[in-house]
Structures are given as C-alpha cells and as structure tokens.
Image (cartoon, rainbow, N blue to C red):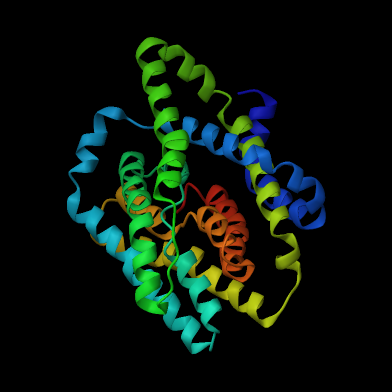
Amino acid sequence: MNILEKNARRYFSLIIILAACLGLALPSFGIKLSFLVIPSLFILMFYTAMKINFNKLQHSILKIKYLLIGTLISFGLIPFILYTIAYIFNFSEIEKMSVIFSALAPTILSAPYFVSIMKGDVEFAFILSMLLTFLAPFIIPIELYLLFQSNINISILEIFKSILYLVFIPVLLVYIIKKLQPNTIELLLSKEHTVISSIFFLFIWAIISVNANNILNLSFHILAVIFIAIIQEFGFFFLILKISRKFLSDSMSKSFAFSVAIKNTALTAGIAIVYSNDLSLVSSMVVLMHVPMFAYIFWKKDKI
C-alpha cells in the first residue's frame, strides 16, 4: 500500500470533516463543484459494486421477512416518531412537512459501500436500498397527502432514470469487468481509499456549500432541525443496530441498521427545493449531519 493510499485510509474521517468546514467557510467555490455530484455518485456506486458478490444476490432477495420489516420501519416507524417529535416541539405545518419529507427519503445509495467498510452484509444492503428507492416515489406522495392534504408530484420517471445511471449501469459495468478482466478489479481496489476520499471530499464540499447560507443563519427552527437530524442519523442507526443484533448475525444487523436508518436526504432536498426553501432545509441539515456520522463509522469501523 503506497503512502497516499495509506494516509487516505487513515485520515478519511478528517477529510470528510475538512470538506464540510470548507463548505461552510468557502461556499462560493464549493458551489462551482456541484457539477461533480452526479459523477461522484456514479464512481462511488462503481466501487460499491466491486464489493458485491453477485452469486449471493439471489440469497439476499429471498430474505423477504427482513426486507418487509426494513420497509415498514423506514416508511412507517421512523416518520411517525419524527412527526411526533415535531408535534411536541410545536413546529409549523411547513416545518412538520419538511421533517416528514426528509424522514420518508429512501436509503442512501452509498449504503452498500459503508456496510462493506463495517464488514456487513453488502448484498442485503444493496437489495434493501434498491427496494426502498423504488418504493419511495409511490409512498412519499401518499403519506404527505394523508398527513397534510398536500399534493406533491414526484417525477417517478426521473427518479428511475437516476437509478439507471447511478446504480444499474455501474453495477453492470463491474459485472462485465469481473467476467472479462478480473485483474482490473484488483487494480482498481488497490487505489480505493485514495479515490473514495477524493470523491467524498468534493461531494461533501459541494453539497454543504449549496446550503451554507441556511445552515449558518441560526434560528430556533434550524437548531430544532439539527436535533431532529441527530435523532434520525445517529439515534435510529444505533437503536436498530442494538435491537437487530438480538435476532440477526453481526454482519446482517450492520447491514439492516445502516440501510434502514441512513437516508438519501440529498435526493429529497433536491425534490423539496422545487416547492420551498423551508421544505428543503431539513434535508440539507441531515446531509450536514451525515458528516460526523460517516466520520464516526470510519473511525470506529472495526468496533461497530
């Protein structure tokens, strides 16, 4: 392992935190990096796919009970708890809606990658994250209407296009390379930490920069949003991890907890901003809360 790769692995947590700080301190430059967000996600999924054992995918698909439980927790229990908290704090209707909108986000697409870092069940994480992503465009409008009588039209076609570009194409490419040039996979993985740390550095800087003004304009609402974000990102992950370990293997429980709890808030922030800056604020804040969450996981990856 060369020195660059070794340092990228050792200091990954610090690299993420530095990117977030730069996003807040130098947002004007970070906004210029926003064009790299989609390519970064593509590369991240490409590296994720390299860790997937395609022979085990069918076995993960057959874990119907756990897929169903994960779906109910993600789209039922978590939004209910967060709505209750928002109600207790006397949030306005738009603030409650923003909390629910963020809570209903599907699993973050990079879940299988982080699960692999924690030595979890990568294949199950991949199947569950895909299931929740496919269901989200149908479930989000229904739940928002039932709770707020609000009609939000989500472009199902656009989301499916994103899934095609960001998931199926990189997965297919890896599958082909594994069949035709398996040595290439080993070569690419030897540079994994250097590539991934660079991607996350640019990605976090860009995402935080876009929302820097709202994040820095502190108010009670934003402070309350931070509280909600901490519960969503940290609370549910460790709670589900602790409970699931009583019933599942260690690798499966890590996969289950991360895939259910860690939301794709960048997706919902992008959808929400079309309707209201306030509506997208919670998603922006949860993106910020991803930083210490991911940094902690990389720092404690062998102990979680």
Q: At x 32% / y 69%, what residue is drawn?
A: 76
Can you name the residue that lies furthest to the top here?
180
Examine the rendered structure and indicate whether residue 285 appears above or below residue 249.
below
Foreground pick, 173 / 110: 173
- Residue 304, quarter of the rendered image: bottom left
Q: At x 49% / y 74%, what residue is drawn?
A: 97
Foreground pick, 152 / 29: 152
The quadrant the N terminus occupies is: top right
Q: At x 63% / y 59%, what residue is drawn?
A: 288
Q: Is residue 240 visible?
A: no
Q: At x 46% / y 57%, what residue is drawn?
A: 263
**Residue 98 on image: x %, y %:** 52, 71
Q: Answer left or right for 285 relative to 82.
A: right
**Total marks placed:** 0
Examine the rendered structure and indicate whether residue 284 appears above or below residue 178.
below
Examine the rendered structure and indicate whether residue 225 appears above or below residue 36.
below
Q: Is residue 143 visible?
A: yes
**Residue 181 on image: x %, y %:** 42, 11
- Residue 258, quarter of the rendered image: bottom left
**Residue 171 on image: x %, y %:** 40, 29
**Residue 31 on image: x %, y %:** 74, 48
Examine the rendered structure and indicate whether residue 68 appears above or below residue 97.
above
